[in-house]
Image (cartoon, rainbow, N blue to C red):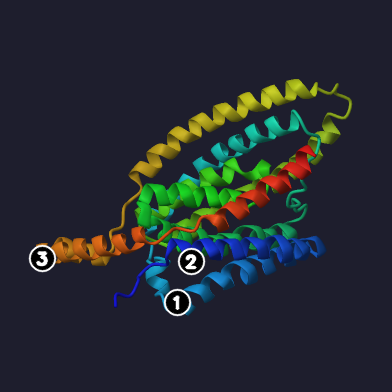
Amino acid sequence: MIRRELPTVNNVNILFLIVGILLLVVGASAQRYNLYSGILITEYLLILLPNIAFLKFKKFSLKKVLKLNRLSLKQMIFIFFIMLFAYPVAVFLNFIMLAMVTSISEAMPIGVPIPDNFTDYILGLFVVAITPGICEEVMFRGTLQNAYSKFGEKKGLIITSILFGIFHFNLLNLLGPIFLGIVLGIILIKTNSLYGSILGHILNNGFAMTIGYLLLKLTKNLELLTKDVPLIDNSIQMVLTAVILASLALFSFIGLYILLKNLPVTKSEELDILEENEDLDLMKDEIVSFEETIEINERIMWSPIVIIAGIFIYSNWIYFFY
C-alpha cells in the first residue's frame, strides 16, 4: 500500500464546500453580531481549524503538505516589494468590476470599517491583516493549491486562485483576490514556503488597512479646506479615477513582473538530493508516474465546487440585480 503524501482533489473539494457553508451560515451571523470577533471566529474556528483537523485526521505531514520551510531575508524583502506593486493592480481590477456593477445597480456592500484612531488601527491590523493572512493561506496556498498541483503547477495555481476569489462571496471583490491569489501562489511555488504567501497576504491586507487609515485622516482635513469648492460630476470623477488607477496599475504591473521573475527560488532539500543521484531520479519519476495514474483513474467530484460557485452567483445576483 502506497501512502499518499498530498490530499486528493476530491477531499479538498469537499473541505472547500464544508468551510464555505460554515462561512456563510455561522461566520456571516457572527460577523453581523460583532465584526471583529466574528472575523476571528470565522478565520480561526471555521477556516484554519477544519483544515488542520483534516490534515491531521488523514495523517499528513503538516510540514510537507503546507511547505513550512524557512524564508531567506532576501526573499522576504522581495515579497514586500512584490505585494507593494501588486496592490495597485488588484485595486484597479476591483475598480473595473465596481464600475460595471454600479452602472446597472445601486446596491453597495458594506466593507470592513476603516479605523479612525491609532488603537483601532493596530487592532485592525491583527484582525484584518495578520489573521486572514495565516488562516486563509493555510487553506488555499497550503491545502488546496498543493492538492491541485497534481494537475500541474500552472493549472493548480489558476484553479486555486479562482476558488480564492469566489470564497470572498463578493462580486466587487472578485477580480482583485483572483489576481492576488495568482501572485501569492507564484510566491509559494518559487520560495517553496507557505510562510512566503502568508507574509504576502498579511502585507497586502496591511497595505489596504494602512492606506485606508491615512486617507480617512487626509479626507477629514480636505473636507474642511474644500467645503466651499463646487462638486465634480460623478461621471467625471469615475473617468479621472479610472485614468489614474489604470496608469498606476500599468506601472505597478511592470515592476511586479520584474520582481516575480527575479524572486530567489528555493529548491526542496529532497529535490536537491535526487538531482545528485541519477538512480534516485529514475525511482522518483516512477513513483510520481504511479501516483499520477492513481489520481487520474479516480473520478474527480466537481459538485462541491459547482455548489459554492452557484451560491456565489445566486447571492450576488439577489443582492445587486434583483
Residue 67 falls left or right of residue 31: left
Choose top left, top right, bottom left or bottom right for residue 58: bottom left
* Upstream in sequence: badge 1 or badge 2: 2
Question: Is 13 or 296 nearer to us in this picture?
Answer: 296
Residue 153 in sight in this render: yes
Q: Nearer the viewer, residue 129 or 278?
A: 278
Q: For the residues marked 1 and 2, what is the alpha-carbon distance in whole angstroms? A: 10 Å
| Other-residue count near label 2 (Cα within 10 Å), few / some / many at <14 / 14–19 / ≥20 | some
Q: Residue 192: image x %, image y %?
A: 36, 59
Residue contact between numbered discs 1 and 2, judged by CB atoms under 8 Å: yes
For the residues marked 3 and 2, what is the alpha-carbon distance in whole angstroms?
33 Å
> Mark 3, mark 2: which one is toward the viewer?
2
Badge 2 amino acid? Asn
Q: Name the kind of residue labelled 1 in the image.
A: Lys
Looking at the image, residue 26 sits to the left or right of residue 201; the answer is right
Between disc 3 and disc 1, the foreground one is 1
Separation of residues labelled 3 and 1 (CA atoms)? 31 Å
**Element type where label 3 sits in the image:** helix
In the picture shown, does residue 144 fall above or below 54? above
In the structure shown, which secondary structural element does the residue marked by tag 2 occupy?
helix
Q: Amino acid at mark 3?
A: Asp
Above or below residue 60? Residue 194 is above
**What SS does tag 1 mark?**
loop
Instruction: Estimate how packed mark 1 is, as few (under 14), some (14 to 19) or many (20 or more) residues with alpha carbons within 10 Å.
Output: few
Q: Which residue is mark 1?
A: 58
Pointer 3 residue: 279
Q: Position of residue 36 (x, y in %)?
A: 73, 63
Q: Is residue 260 above or below residue 135?
A: above
What's the residue at 36%, 48% (across, down)?
263
